[in-house]
Image (cartoon, grey):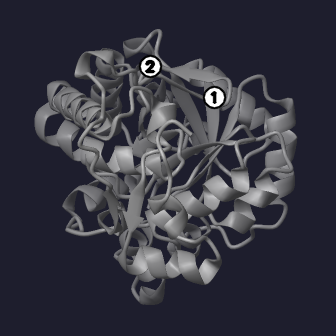
């Protein structure tokens, strides 16, 4: 199977996969504030991650490209939605364009459509410094997203089997590249230990990519004659991964919370858990597939409006304020965090204005 065919398979499986009705964001609830002292008209959703200024904390996360006309059309839709809403956007892995230069158009369509937007290039950790520079130049990217997908590669029939030297490669590229480097998981969650290692490099941003959204182990298992089903439940859920990453980053690295984000309410929860922004992928992909550019735009706009309402309700006029909104954690997320030494009661005792 060619790389382009595999890219199209990934999209089709992601769109056809049944979305879980529950995920770890359902373990998080805001403490109600009857006197928020806020106004919807005064809400400011702008934020900075690393060196990048974003007018919205919503990031359309890496999904597609490298699969011919179908992925070119999808990236065009997503880029138009990003342009019209002010959301940042990441393309899917650009390695396909290095294998087949004809696929470059499926990626650079994003910059053609969204000339002034914040766009992330994307490659896996097997990249070289020269490839990193080429990926950034290909779409005039504002940052490079390096994805970590060990489990996906292990399950993928034709996937990589050697992951030695990844941290050293990341360190070299983060120190040498002229744009910020973002390290992203793809659905199995960054742990405290992983972020602590990345903190020793020049990486500016991490994207937690916890499980709860698109399940790449399940997608790749559908392509196997003999599935590794145990990997379908592998990894950290989104909420514990955000908490662990934020603690490890300790404000020296920006954190994007992602993994099954469904709406503006989940985005608010991710930020209240300490993330600086939130990434969303599967839901935007489905909106673009069903409604094209306008469908994707409507979905992002709705998320922004929902986030604004939650911020007003809890009394947070700025994204930074939202981090101090008290939360109560329950269920499996609470149990995981207790076992890992991150007391959930710390979140219920936060105070706005601290």
**Circle 2 or circle 1, nearest the eye:** 2
The image quadrant that residue 354 belongs to is top right
> Mark 2: few, some, or many residues within 10 Å (few <14, many ≥20)?
some
Of callouts 2 and 1, which one flags the residue occurring earlier in the amino acid sequence? Answer: 2
The image quadrant that residue 284 belongs to is top left
- Rendered position, 228 above or below 154: below
Is residue 275 visible to us here? yes
Relative horizontal placement of residue 241, taking residue 75 as reference (left or right): right
Place of residue 260 in the rendered image (x, y in percent of width and height, measured from the top left): 35, 58
Tag count: 2
Place of residue 234 in the rendered image (x, y in percent of width and height, measured from the top left): 50, 79
Place of residue 343 in the rendered image (x, y in percent of width and height, measured from the top left): 57, 72
Instruction: Name the residue at the left extreme.
Output: 291
Tag 2–tag 1 contact (CB < 8 Å): no
| Closer to the camera in the image, 219 or 45 | 45
| Closer to the camera in the image, 248 or 144 | 248
At mark 1, the secondary structure is: strand
- Rendered position, 263 above or below 303: below
Relative horizontal placement of residue 97, taking residue 174 as reference (left or right): left
Instruction: Name the residue at the front extreme.
Output: 35
**Which residue matches tag 1?**
143
- Rendered position, 164 above or below 176: below
State the residue at coordinates (34%, 35%): 315
Is residue 188 visible to us here? no
**Which residue matches tag 2?**
55
State the residue at coordinates (84%, 61%): 165
């Amino acid at each position: 199977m060619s790389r382009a065919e595999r890219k199209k398979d990934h999209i089709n499986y992601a769109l056809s996969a049944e979305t879980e009705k529950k995920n770890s964001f359902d373990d998080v609830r805001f403490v109600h504030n009857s006197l928020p002292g806020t106004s919807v008209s005064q809400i400011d959703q702008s934020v900075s991650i690393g060196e990048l200024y974003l007018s919205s904390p919503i990031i359309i996360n890496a999904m597609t490209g490298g699969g011919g006309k179908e992925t070119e059309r999808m990236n065009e839709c997503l880029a138009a939605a990003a342009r019209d809403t002010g959301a940042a956007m990441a393309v899917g892995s650009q390695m396909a364009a290095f294998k087949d230069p004809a696929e470059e158009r499926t990626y650079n369509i994003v910059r053609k459509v969204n000339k002034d937007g914040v766009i992330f290039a994307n490659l896996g950790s097997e990249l070289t410094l020269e490839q990193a520079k080429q990926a950034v130049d290909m779409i005039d990217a504002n940052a490079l997203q390096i994805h970590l997908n060990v489990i996906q590669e292990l399950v993928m029939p034709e996937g990589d089997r050697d992951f030695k030297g990844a941290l050293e490669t990341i360190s070299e590229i983060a120190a040498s590249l002229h744009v910020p480097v973002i390290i992203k998981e793809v659905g199995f969650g960054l742990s405290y230990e992983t972020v602590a290692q990345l903190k020793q490099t020049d990486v500016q941003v991490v994207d937690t990519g916890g499980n709860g959204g698109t399940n790449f182990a399940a997608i790749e298992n559908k392509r196997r004659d003999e599935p590794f089903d145990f990997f379908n439940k592998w990894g950290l859920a989104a909420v514990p991964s955000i908490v662990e990453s934020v603690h490890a980053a300790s404000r020296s690295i920006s954190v994007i919370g992602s993994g099954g984000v469904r709406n503006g309410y989940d985005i608010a929860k991710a930020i209240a858990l300490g993330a600086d922004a939130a990434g969303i992928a599967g839901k935007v992909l489905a909106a673009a597939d069903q409604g094209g550019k306008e469908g994707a735009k409507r979905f992002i706009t709705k998320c922004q409006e929902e986030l604004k309402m939650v911020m007003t309700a809890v009394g947070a006029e700025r994204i930074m304020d939202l981090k101090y909104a008290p939360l109560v954690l329950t269920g499996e997320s609470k149990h995981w965090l207790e076992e890992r030494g991150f007391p959930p009661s710390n979140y219920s005792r936060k105070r706005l204005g601290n």
